[in-house]
Amino acid sequence: MELIQDTRCYTNVCVNGKWFHHDHCTTTAYMLKGGASANIELAKMPTTESELVALLTKIL
């Protein structure tokens, strides 16, 4: 699925049993686990959900 290129949009995805939040038009994501989570810097800005999952999988 293509990600809408709008800064007001976001996507939450599950990778290896962990949920991540990504704000569209950025190169960051963070794990949804309650409390403050550190930002994860992605290698590039994803344009599709499958690309986002692939980028997160490489980091984990």
Image (cartoon, rainbow, N blue to C red):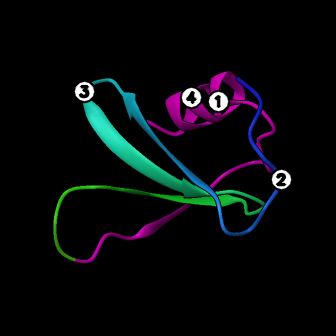
Work out how far the residue at label 2 is from the one at label 4, CA to CA, in angstroms: 17 Å
* Relative horizontal placement of residue 50, taking residue 22 as reference (left or right): right
Q: Residue at x 64, y 35 (%)?
A: 52
Which stretch appears magenta? Answer: 36-60
State which quarter of the image contains the N terminus: top right
Q: Residue at x 77, y 46 (%)?
A: 4
Please state which amino acid type lies under the numbered disc 4.
Answer: Val
Q: Indicate whether residue 6 is drawn in magenta.
A: no
State which quarter of the image contains the C terminus: top left
Instruction: Count neighbours of disc 3 (C-alpha within 10 A) and say few if under 14, some if 14 to 19, many if 20 or more.
Output: few
| SS of the residue under disc 1 | helix
Q: Earlier in the sequence, mark 1 or mark 3?
A: 3
Please state which amino acid type lies under the numbered disc 2.
Answer: Gln
Q: Earlier in the sequence, mark 2 or mark 3?
A: 2
Q: Earlier in the sequence, mark 2 or mark 4?
A: 2
Residue at mark 2:
5
Work out how far the residue at label 4 is from the one at label 1, CA to CA, in angstroms: 6 Å
Query: What x and y, as percent, mark residue 49?
Result: 64, 29
Instruction: Count neighbours of disc 2 (C-alpha within 10 A) and say few if under 14, some if 14 to 19, many if 20 or more.
Output: some
Query: What x and y, as percent, mark residue 18?
Result: 27, 36
Residue 7 falls in image quadrant: bottom right
Query: What x and y, as percent, mark residue 23?
Result: 61, 61
Q: Earlier in the sequence, mark 2 or mark 1?
A: 2
Residue at mark 4:
53
Disc number lying in front (4 or 1): 1
Residue at mark 3:
17
Mark 4 and mark 1 in contact? Answer it, CB < 8 Å. yes
Residue at mark 1:
49
